[in-house]
Image (cartoon, helix red, strand yellow):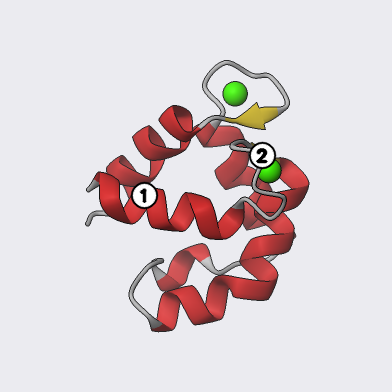
Amino acid sequence: MSEKARKLFDALDLNSDGVLTRVEVITALRSKGPTLAAQGDLPFWAVGDVDTSSALFDRANADGDDVLTFEEFEREVDRRFGW
Ligand SMILES: [Ca+2]
Ligand SMILES: [Ca+2]
């Protein structure tokens, strides 16, 4: 549901500018992923290596620009994370 997507988005938005870059997704999942997963805020499969995180970014990035908006992120995680 959207509340979990919001919480996760905010955790990954390292510079709090309201969008996620590829680097933020990769960096944040590496640094915070295990904690988020332990809290139930992220599926364990999503705590992956650089390639996994980068692929997640690409799948979510519907318009193919350089950033994920919350809408793009929410659509992807709500579909794939099964919460
Ligand atoms: Ca950001
Ligand atoms: Ca985008």
In the picture of the structure, the residue carrying the numbered disc 1 is: 5
Q: Is 76 situated above or below 25?
A: above
Q: Quadrant of ligand 2?
A: top right
**Residue name at image x 59 percent, y 56 percent:** 12
Packing grade of label 1 (10 A; few <14, some 14-19, many >=20) is many
**Could you tell which of marks 1 and 2 lies nearer the N-terminus?**
1
Quarter location, residue 65:
top right
On the rendered structure, is 1 left or right of 13? left
- Percent from the top left, x then y, of residue 42? 41, 66
Query: Mark 2 sits on what residue?
Result: 17
Is the residue indicated by label 1 positioned so its CB lies within 8 Å of ligand 2?
Answer: no
Q: Residue furthest front?
A: 16
Q: Amino acid at mark 1?
A: Ala
User: Residue extending furthest right?
Assistant: 23
Residue shown at 60% from the left, 41% from the top: 57
Marks 1 and 2 in Cβ contact (< 8 Å) = no
Mark 2 Cβ and ligand 1 under 8 Å apart: yes
Residue at horizontal 40 percent and vertical 57 percent from the top = 7
- x, y percent for residue 30: 68, 70
Q: Is residue 45 above or below residue 58?
A: below
Relative to 38, say whether 21 is above or below: above
Compared to residue 47, the image places residue 57 above or below, namely above
The reply to whether residue 61 is in sight is: yes
Q: Is residue 70 left or right of residue 41?
A: right
Count of picture labels: 2
Q: Position of residue 32 (x, y in %)?
A: 60, 73
Judging depth in this view, the residue of 60 and 21 nearest the camera is 21
Q: Residues within 10 Å of mark 2 (few under 14, many from 20)?
A: few
CA gap, disc 1 to disc 2? 16 Å
Residue shown at the point (22%, 57%) measured from the top left: 83
Where residue 24 sits in the image (x, y, percent)? 71, 51
Q: Secondary structure at mark 2?
A: loop
